[in-house]
Image (cartoon, rainbow, N blue to C red):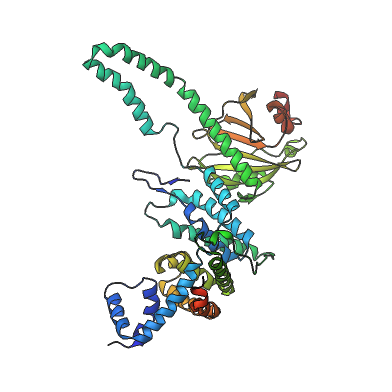
């Protein structure tokens, strides 16, 4: 028989289910014969049972649970608005009347009516999907802004210099964008201050979240590729060939627009209509005349 | 939440079921409730951002614990450049959610006391003992998984776990004797 010294470490390995095969068989056989090892094992099990009775060691507070859920919902997985299986089902439904028409000519008026009904239902879908995409982007921007406010999305770069923040995003986001120079640098009074930025996930890809401060109020700018984000709906304000879409969501003013392949969503607590909201930042700039 | 891996045969996985475990790990690393909450949130944010790089056959649980640990030690490294005031919470009460509704009042009381004693004893351990006890006894990670989280050899896991348990047994000796006592175990 092997001595207890050779099995000293096996108490722990046996307890942690790290023994297998021949080692496990030998140790079990040894336990049958050795009371000293059985006592050691019982003592180890006793501690282990005590610890396991106190599971979980800490429970996450409800507030944290909600925050994590909110954070995870902010970063949805890449789910297209018209999933392939849905498209297949629609095509299948459209094809059905033609197939059945061969079997029963008497049913063709009903089938034509069904087709017309389906076409009537499906025609507005591009517009609906476009608005759904725009709403999704607005919701993501507001959620990001909220998370910034409650500290759950801390800035990854803190800088008041647009060039530094632009350089930080370069290569991190799948698009090129450049933050405008500060107003004071172009000879006008600066009404907002850049605070920094961070990466966020939007529809499975990276988007840029840029933070500003204006009159002690934080402003968030979500920038994403126009392939994944859409600006639509709300009160429309045209300026410089760009259509700005103003809406209110959860008490925040949200302005979205698309230009040069990028879609922007600006979220703030600024009061007033879309035009008034734009003027808060642009009143002292040359672009102010456009609003 | 559903995190999808790209590609055919993608696996729907969720990380939210590890929230208590991650929070416990954060609590024993930071020894501070607010810090722990921030750490867990940051862990989920980082995890979601990096989800695309996670292979479908990866072990998400140990991956999340690894992220949390890396975030924490990166923060510590930054803080070393400037002094930070970190409040250490001692003698904290036991939250209600650890209690099992089927237990009677006396058992609940014993359970609360016991859990408080266990928490206090674990928090007295050095951080390398605290985390290895949590990963093994509370999270059931294998030695290999623990080695991966702690970025150390499996042999180190074994020896460190042995020393951590020995120390913890000493700290909990009174509780262990008490739990043997019929007056506690079989009362009411």
Q: In this image, A281 relative to B42: left or right?
A: right
Residue at x 68% of width, y 37% of height: A268
Residue at x 63% of width, y 65% of height: B93
Residue B107 in the image: state x and y as whole percent.
53, 67
Q: Residue furthest front?
A: B188
Quadrant position of the C terminus of chain A in the picture? top right
Residue A4 in the image: state x and y as whole percent.
35, 87
Q: Is residue A76 above or below residue A17?
A: above
Q: In this image, A188 relative to B123: left or right?
A: right
Q: Is residue A19 above or below residue A271?
A: below
Along the line of sight, the residue nearer the viewer: A62 or A85:
A62
Residue at x 54% of width, y 47% of height: A69
Residue at x 42% of width, y 65% of height: B145
Count of labels in the image: 0
Quarter of image, res A166: top right
Quarter of image, res A46: bottom left
Along the line of sight, the residue nearer the viewer: B92 or B148:
B92
Q: In this image, A267 relative to A99: left or right?
A: right
The reply to whether residue A177 is in sight is no
Q: Residue furthest right?
A: A189
Along the line of sight, the residue nearer the viewer: B188 or A149:
B188
Quadrant position of the N terminus of chain A in the picture? bottom left
Residue B180 in the image: state x and y as whole percent.
48, 78
Residue B175 in the image: state x and y as whole percent.
54, 77
Q: Is residue B27 above or below residue A69?
A: below
Quarter of image, res A169: top right
The reply to whether residue A41 is in sight is yes
């Amino acid at each position: 028989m092997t001595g207890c010294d050779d099995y000293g470490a096996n108490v722990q390995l046996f307890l942690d289910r790290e023994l297998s095969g021949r080692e496990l068989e030998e140790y079990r056989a040894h336990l049958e014969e050795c009371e000293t090892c059985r006592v050691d094992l019982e003592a180890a099990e006793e501690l282990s049972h005590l610890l396991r009775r106190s599971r979980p060691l800490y429970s996450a507070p409800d507030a944290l649970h909600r925050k994590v859920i909110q954070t995870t919902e902010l970063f949805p997985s890449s789910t297209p608005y018209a999933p392939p299986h849905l498209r297949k089902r629609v095509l299948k439904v459209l094809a059905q009347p033609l197939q059945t028409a061969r079997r029963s000519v008497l049913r063709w008026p009903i089938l034509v009516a069904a087709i017309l009904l389906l076409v009537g239902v499906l025609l507005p879908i591009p517009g609906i999907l476009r608005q759904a995409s725009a709403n999704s982007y607005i919701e993501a921007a507001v959620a990001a802004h909220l998370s910034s406010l409650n500290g759950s999305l801390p800035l990854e770069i803190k800088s008041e210099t647009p060039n530094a923040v632009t350089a930080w995003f370069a290569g991190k986001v799948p698009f090129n964008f450049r933050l405008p120079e500060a107003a004071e640098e172009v000879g006008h009074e600066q009404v907002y201050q850049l605070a920094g930025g961070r990466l966020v996930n939007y529809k499975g890809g990276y988007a840029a979240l840029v933070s500003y401060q204006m009159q002690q109020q934080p402003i968030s700018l979500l920038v994403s590729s126009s392939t994944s984000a859409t600006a639509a709906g709300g009160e429309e304000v045209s300026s410089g060939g760009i259509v700005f879409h103003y809406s209110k969501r959860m008490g925040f003013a949200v302005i979205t627009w698309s230009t040069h392949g990028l879609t922007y969503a600006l979220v703030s607590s600024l009061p007033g209509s879309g035009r008034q909201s734009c003027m808060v930042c642009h009143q002292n700039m040359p672009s102010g005349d456009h609003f | 939440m559903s995190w999808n891996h790209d590609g055919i045969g993608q696996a729907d996985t969720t990380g939210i079921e590890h929230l208590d475990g991650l929070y416990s790990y954060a609590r024993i690393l930071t020894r501070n409730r607010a810090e722990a909450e921030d750490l867990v949130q940051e862990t989920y944010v980082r995890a979601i951002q990096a989800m695309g790089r996670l292979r479908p056959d990866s072990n998400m649980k140990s991956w999340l614990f690894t992220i949390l640990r890396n975030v924490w030690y990166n923060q510590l490294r930054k803080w070393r450049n400037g002094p930070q005031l970190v409040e250490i919470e001692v003698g904290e009460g036991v939250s209600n959610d650890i209690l099992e509704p089927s237990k009677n009042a006396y058992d609940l009381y014993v359970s609360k006391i016991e859990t408080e004693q266990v928490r206090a004893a674990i928090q007295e351990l050095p951080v390398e003992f605290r985390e290895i006890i949590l990963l093994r006894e509370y999270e059931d990670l294998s030695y290999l998984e623990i080695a991966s989280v702690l970025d150390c050899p499996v042999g180190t896991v074994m020896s460190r776990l042995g020393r951590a348990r020995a120390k913890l047994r000493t700290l909990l000796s009174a509780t262990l004797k008490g739990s043997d006592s019929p007056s506690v175990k079989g009362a009411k």
